Image: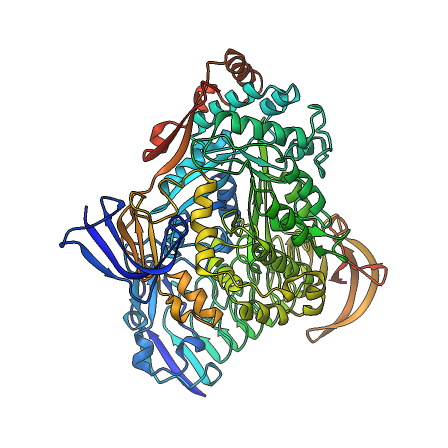
Amino acid sequence: MNTVTLTVKKVPELYLECEKVNPDAFAGKTADQIAKLPGYQGKEISTLGDYFTVTGDAGATAADTKIVINGDCTKMKYIGAKMTAGEVVVNSTTDMYTGSWMTGGKLLIKGDVHSFCGLAMKGGEFIIEGDAGNYLGAAYRGDWRGMSGGVLRIKGNAGSDVATFMTGGELIVEGDVDIHIGTHMEGGKIIVKGNANRRVGGQLVKGEIYVFGNINVMMPGFKPVNEVELDVDGTTAKFTEYVGDLGERHPKRKGETVYGKLFLKQ
Amino acid sequence: MSEYIIKNGHVFDPVQGIKGDKKDICVKDGKIIDKVGSGAKIIDASGKTVMAGALEIHAHVAGPKVNAGRWYRPEDKHFDSHKTAGITRIEGGKSIPTVFKTGYEYARMGFTFAMEAAMPPLYARHVHEEIHDTPIIDEAALPVFGNNWFILEYLKNQEIENTAAYIAWVMRQTKGYGVKVVNPGGTEAWAWGLNCLTIHDPVPYFEITPAEIIKGLMAANEYLGLPHSMHIHQNDLGNPGNYQTTIDTLKLAEGVKATNNFGRDQVMHSTHIQFHSYKGTNWGDFESGAKEVMDYVNKQKNLTIDTGNVTLDETTTMTADGPFEHHLHGLNHLKWFNVDVELETAAGVVPFIYDPNNAVFASQWAVGLEIALYAKDPMRCFITTDHPNAGPFTRYPRVYAWLMSEKYRNERLNSFKKADKVISATNLSGMDREITLYELAQMTRAGPAKALGLSKDYGGLKVGMNADIAIYNINPDKFPSDGAAIEKAFAQVAYLFKDGKICVEEGKIVDMGKKHTFWVDAKVKENKQVMHDVREKFLRYYSVNENNYSVPESYAPHQHIISVDATQA
C-alpha cells in the first residue's frame, strides 16, 4: 500500500470542500497530479496544492492507497466522502460530511467531526476518536436513506439526530448522545455506551438500539416485554427489552408483527 | 440581427413533407427566409440532421408544486452544487431542476418551447415568476379548471356561455394558455374523502359527474375557439383496469368539432395516457391496455395524446390529482406534500423510484413505449415523460433511442429481473416498429405545434416561420445502430437556434436567447352574471382580494399574446 501525506499549509478563509480527498480520487496519481486536483471554496475553484503540501504517490487503485493528513482540518469538508476502499487517517478535527456516503475502506479521524458525518454510509469502517456534531450516520437532509451498512464507531459523544433513517450496519457511540436517536430507523444496530437524552427510537419501525446508561425520558410508544442477558460489543450484561415505536407502522413476517427493539441496560 | 445559412443538412420537416433531403435553411431577423445575402454566416450541417425546435406539450416545470418538490427534496440536488465554466449558473437538481437548469437542459436537447401543464390560478404569479426566470425557451401555462367551483356550478346548469366567459376571465387574470383538467371532479370529491374513479361518479355537493364536466369544458373551449383544445389528465390515473374509463372519456369527444382559426383539429388532448392504459384488477394480474386504448385513439381523429413514458429513474411525482398522491404515499411511505387551493384545485407531491427490478414499474415502462409504437398518426401522438412524474424530461434522448431502436429496447426488456413477467403482461416484445427521424419530428415538433395551435409559426422550417432550429450530430445515411449513440446525439445538439440566434453550440450554452411567455387573450361579450359571481366568491370564500389575484405585466414582461375574438360566438 502506498501512502500519500497531505500537510495543511494554508487554512481556508471559508471552508474547503475536499470532495477529491479520498483514495478513489488519488488512485493512480503522483503527488504532483494530486496537488492539481480541484478543491472548492464557495463558487471558487482552487487546487488541493493551494492548501496542502502533498508528498508520496498514490497506489494504482484505491485499495492500494493510504492517505495521512496532518495539520488543522477544522475547515475541511467531505474528507473521505464516497470512498470505496483504501485508508484515510486524519490527525485533526474535520468539518461536515466527513466519511459520508462511504462504501468501503477505513477512515480514522483522530480529532472531532462536525455535523452530517458518516451520512448514508454503506460499508467500510469509520472511527472517530473525539466527539461528533449532529446527524452522525443519518440520512442527508430530506433524504429517507440513512446508514445502511459498515461500522461507525465514535469514542466520544455525539449530538442530536444520530442515525436518522438507519436501515443497516452498526453505529457505536462510546459516550453520550443528545435527543432524537434512531428516528425512523428501519434496520441495523445502534449501541450507546453512555447516556441518551430524550426521544430514543421515535417512529422506530425495525432495528435494534442498545443503551448502557440512562434514557432521560422514555418515548411513550415503547413497551417493556422481556429481560435478557446479552453480549453487546464486548460487554455482557442484563438488559430490559422494549418493543416499539407502537405508534408507527410495522411490517408483518409469518403473521407476526415485527417491532423495533430497544434494550436498556439494568 | 445576423443572417445565417445552414448548409447541406438533412432536413426533416413534416410541415413541408421533407424527409431527410439535403436543403439549405436561411435565417434572418428571427425568421426563416428564402435567401440570404453573401455575408450570411455559414453553418455547415453536412452529415447532420436539421429539425425545427422541439415543443414540449406537457411538463411540470414552474410554479408552487414544482417548487414544493424543490424545497422538500434537497437530496435531489445535493451533488450538483458546483459551477462549471461558461455563462451558465450552477445547475442543480435531477427530477426537479432549478429554473436555470430547466432552460439549459431543454435547449441542449433541441427544445424551444415548454408548456407548464398545471397552473393553479390562485398561484399564477408564482408560476410566471419561475417561467420568467427560466432561460432560453418560450413557455406557457395551462390553468386548471376541472375542480373549480365556478365551473362545477355553471356546468351543473349547462351554462356553456358563462363557463366560457369565466375561462376567458381566468386566462386573462392568470396569463394562461388553455383549459387544463385534472381528475375532473375527483380532486374536489376528495375534500369529502371521496374520489371519482369513473366518469359517472358524482361529485358530492355539486352533484355533477366527470363526464358532464369534460363535455362542458370541451364545449366551452370550442365556444371560445382557443388555440389549444381541452387538455385532460383523466380520472382513475395509475390503477389497474383503468383503460375502460380512459376509453369512456375519449368517447366523450365523439361528434364534437374543433372550432378555431389556428389549424387545430383535436377537441381533446389526453395527456400521459400511459398511466391510463392498464388492464387487470390488481398489481398482481396487471396487464398492458395500450392496444385497446390506441386502437380507439387511432380511429378517432379529433383526439391527440401524449405518452408519459416511464424512464425507470428516481423521480418526484407531482399533480393536481391530490387523492392520487395520497394513494401513492400509502404505497411507498415516502414523504408526502399536499396543498388545497381554495375554490380551485389541490396538489400533492411524493418522491418515487421506478425500480427496474419491480415487474410493475418495468411493465409501465413497456406500456409507455407501446403507446408511441401503436400510434398510426404521429401527428396526434407526442412523446412526454409527464416530467417529472414518469421520469425527468432530461431522459427524452433515452426514450427516443428506445423508440428508434428495437434492439436497444429489447436489450432493456430482456435484462429486467422479472423479464418473463413483464413480457407476458405487455405487448412490447413482439413489436418491431422503429420510429423514424421524420416520425420523431412529427411527434416532437409539427404535431405538438399543431395541437397547441402554434403551427403557423412553430414546429416547422417553412419560409416565414420562426427560426427555432435544432441541428443534431446524426447522419441519417449512417443512422447509429447503437442505442447509446442515439441517446448521446439527442442529448446535445450541434446547434440550437432560438428566434434566429445561436443559443447552444455542441451542447454548450452560448446565449440566453430571448424567452417569451405565451398566453391567450380571449374576448367575450360582457357577462354581468359571471362578473357578479366572481365578486361574490372573492368576498365570501377567497383568502385574497380580487385585486391581488391577477398577474400584472411585470410578472411576465416578455409576453407573446395570442388574441381570440369570441364576441360573435
Height in image: A142 above or below B209?
below
B523 or B129, which is in the foreground? B523
| Location of residue B352 by image quarter | bottom right
Q: Can residue A130 be seen in this view?
A: yes
Image coordinates of residue B477 in percent, x first then y, are 39, 69
Judged from this view, the residue extending furthest toward the right is: A255
| Location of residue A76 by image quarter | bottom left
For the point 73% across and 48% down, which residue is it?
A: B241
Image coordinates of residue A248 in percent, x first then y, are 73, 50
B370 or B233, which is in the foreground? B370
Query: Would residue B263 be found to the left or right of residue B363 on screen?
Result: left
Image coordinates of residue B51 in percent, x first then y, are 37, 55
Judged from this view, the residue extending furthest toward the left is: B39
Query: Would residue A68 be found to the left or right of residue A203 on screen?
Result: left
Image coordinates of residue B174 in percent, x first then y, are 45, 29
For the point 41% across and 61% down, which residue is it?
A: B491
- Snapshot colouring: rainbow
Height in image: B102 above or below A170?
above
Numbered marks: total: 0
Query: Would residue B212 be found to the left or right of residue B538 on screen?
Result: right
For the point 46% across and 85% down, which residue is it?
A: A64
Q: Is residue B543 visible?
A: no
B65 or B560, which is in the foreground? B560
